[in-house]
Amino acid sequence: MIPKDWDFIPLEQLALVERGKFTARPRNDPRYYGGSIPFVQTGDVASANGLLQSYSQTLNQEGLSVSKLFPKGSILVTIAATIGEVAMTSIDVACPDSIVVVQAKSGVCREWLKYALIARKPAMETAATQNAQKNINLQVLRPLLISTPPLEEQRKIAQILGTWDSAIALTENLIAAKQKRKEFLLDYLLLKNAHNEWRKLKLAELSTKPISYGIVQTGEPVKKGIPCVRVVDLTARELKPQKMITTCEEISQSYKKTILEKGELMIALRGEIGLVRLVDEKLVGCNLTRGIARVSPDKRLVLPEYLLWAIRSPLFRNNLLRRVNGSALQEIPITELRKVIVPVPPIERQQVIANLLDTADYEIEIIQNLFNFLQIQKRGLMQKLLTGEWRVKIEKAGQQLTEPKT
């Protein structure tokens, strides 16, 4: 259902639709690359967040002779492997035939068309065929129906969604700036300030219990069993025992040395080596799997909150990675982990450092939550505006969103 003054119009009536071009064989011939002409790949479109401003490759003039340059403001749509990713170019670009170039015709707002195509990604994915890889062709894309409002409404819809995109981009830039600030603090406080008067102790000397790895074989999952933390769990924003694999009480007790207590640290030995998390109340009584080591900070020497950041520091991480074994399954042997040196300032200084870095981390979390909220809002607005469920009233005084009266 769409409003009476809207219509379903095939994409080919709204825009020129053609595939990118690169006719050279072999395509990876180095004589075509390395010039100043942007050559956009599927991954560039997928990571562009709707507006393409960077690219992974360039062509020289010889490369351009077997390709084609498309103007700024073209809409790129990925049609192979990754289906239906959409971005508008902010520069003139060339691209391969795994990307379709859409150029809005006169009387069509190109910014609105970009959002309309983003909304049609599920339809593109459904229409994709599976050969060596998923793909769609122009015969599918050109007749793709787009619910199309009058031009002025297209412009207003694009203006509203563009406002949300600007807010999202600003928030993303703020997150990046805050992240750089945190990395600077981490480097400055724990590397530049690791003066001679700071003690240098092995990680094993800072633990009240032997540093050990967890359960080798957890067995079949047990309903209401003991949750076991895996390396993949450490990557989650929030560790939730109810989402972890479980083991039986008997197996957990046979690895009693890694049953978790509050304030201990969990360090990944494989996968994301050196990834570290603090044990909070929710994890007390849980156990660990083979890929994680448990450290029990000696609070007479080191605060858990400080040790957490010390392990995250470039100083510790570089020392750790030098000790990784060279096998196919790379990991840090537990004996090597125990030997890694940690700079240990006085307890009062540790508290100051931990507080500063905790605050920097909390600021990033708050802004990240805002970023996530703006993205959710934008998706909701797209659903309402691009289907006509919410109408944009065109007025001299401005614009407003209205829901249709029932």
Image: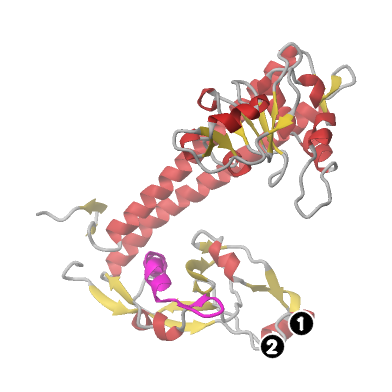
Query: Dividing the picture into quarters, in which one does residue 338 lie?
Result: top right
Q: Is residue 127 magenta?
A: yes
Residue 15 location (% of width, % of height): 40, 80
Residue 403 location (% of width, % of height): 19, 53
Secondary structure, mark 1, is loop
The residue wearing badge 2 is 24
Query: Dividing the picture into quarters, in which one does residue 106 lie?
Result: bottom left
- Asked whether, in this view, residue 169 is left or right of residue 277, the answer is left
Residue, far left: 406
Q: How is the image coloured?
A: secondary structure
Q: Which residues lie in the magenta part?
A: 110-135
Residue 292 location (% of width, % of height): 68, 37
**Residue at 33%, 52% in the rendered image:** 380
Say which of 280 and 253 sits in front. 253
Between discs 1 and 2, the one toward the N terminus: 2
The residue wearing badge 1 is 29
